[in-house]
Amino acid sequence: MNKLEKNTVERSFSDYIYNLCLPKKIENYIIKFHQSSSFMQNKYSLNNNTNSEIYFWLRQIEKSDVLPEYYEQKIDLKKLDNLNIKGSFREYNPEMNFTFEELSQVINSSFGRDMNNLSKRYGSAGALYPVIPLLLHFKTDNLLESGAYVYHSLDQSLLKIKSWTIEEAHNIKSNVCFFSDKLPNTCIAYAIDIRRAIVKYHIRGYRHALIEVGAMSQVFKESLHQLKDNVGEVSWSGFNDNELSYKCGLNVRLCPIVMLQWFGHVKNRK
């Protein structure tokens, strides 16, 4: 048996054990629960059931902390004069592109693996890493062709899984966001391999995966701002979950996209 045949047999046996260990009832429960949180809207029929009276309350509590009304003691920490924290941005210059070297640096430094211990910059329960980072590019230019790319952390490469025509890319981006013209032509999409997430930790594994998405987006934000000064990012969940996952070539039940993170050159950096 040659090396290729041996690897094929080992992979087949591994897949057999994997499917044997999957908790099917929990898989169906998580898939149904996830679908109950999915979002569906378009620019012609905005589905917004929010009570209009809540906006007054929202204006009062935005950018505030949840604090106890009563506490036993207050201990003042040593103050820092300037925390220089960069927020998110919603207006970008779509005509300015990253160079291929800059794109490579920010993606590899965010999601790549240490070749000695195979760890990444963010934690993952059981080292399972069930969250798949994708790069979505909505305009063919000197950087990339439009389409959906999966990041390969060991190989430090982008694997194109779906190509889009100019019209397809425009329509997908327009459906993702109603003010898409203000957003850049590139974003990171975070998709969860639900089976990988739950095979060891069951329902808790789904929670671990969502925590991992948050950790990944923060790591990407930090890597981006270390790259250069005139860039920014914004996390986004206001998209049609199943439609976007399908357009990216993913299984909408087993590998849904749960969050986007747009990034690019900002228009007015304050």
Image (spheres, rainbow, N blue to C red):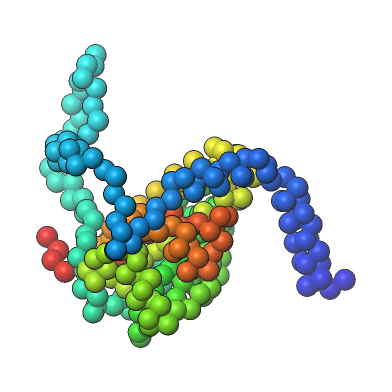
Position of residue 193 relative to residue 139, above or below, is above
- Name the image quarter holding residue 46: bottom left
The percent position of residue 192, horizontal first and vertical second, equals: 51, 54
**Which quarter of the image is occupied by the N terminus?**
bottom right
Residue 68 visible in the displayed image: yes
Position of residue 149 relative to residue 226, above or below, is below
Residue at the image position 23 percent from the left and 27 percent from the top: 67
Question: Seen from this angle, which residue lies furthest bottom?
Answer: 142
Nearest the eye: 259 or 150 = 259
The percent position of residue 199, horizontal first and vertical second, equals: 64, 45
**250 lies left or right of 264:** right
Residue 101 visible in the displayed image: no
**26 lies left or right of 139:** right
Nearest the eye: 20 or 103 = 20
**12 lies left or right of 43:** right
**Which quarter of the image is occupied by the C terminus?**
bottom left
**123 lies left or right of 259:** right
Nearest the eye: 208 or 25 = 25
Position of residue 228 relative to residue 139, above or below, is above
Question: Seen from this angle, which residue lies furthest right?
Answer: 1
Question: Seen from this angle, which residue lies furthest front?
Answer: 45
The percent position of residue 241, horizontal first and vertical second, equals: 43, 57
Question: Seen from this angle, which residue lies furthest top?
Answer: 72
Q: How many marks?
A: 0
Residue at the image position 39 percent from the left and 52 percent from the top: 39
Residue at the image position 43 percent from the left and 68 percent from the top: 135
Residue at the image position 72 percent from the left and 45 percent from the top: 21
The percent position of residue 247, horizontal first and vertical second, equals: 47, 69
Position of residue 190 relative to residue 155, above or below, is above
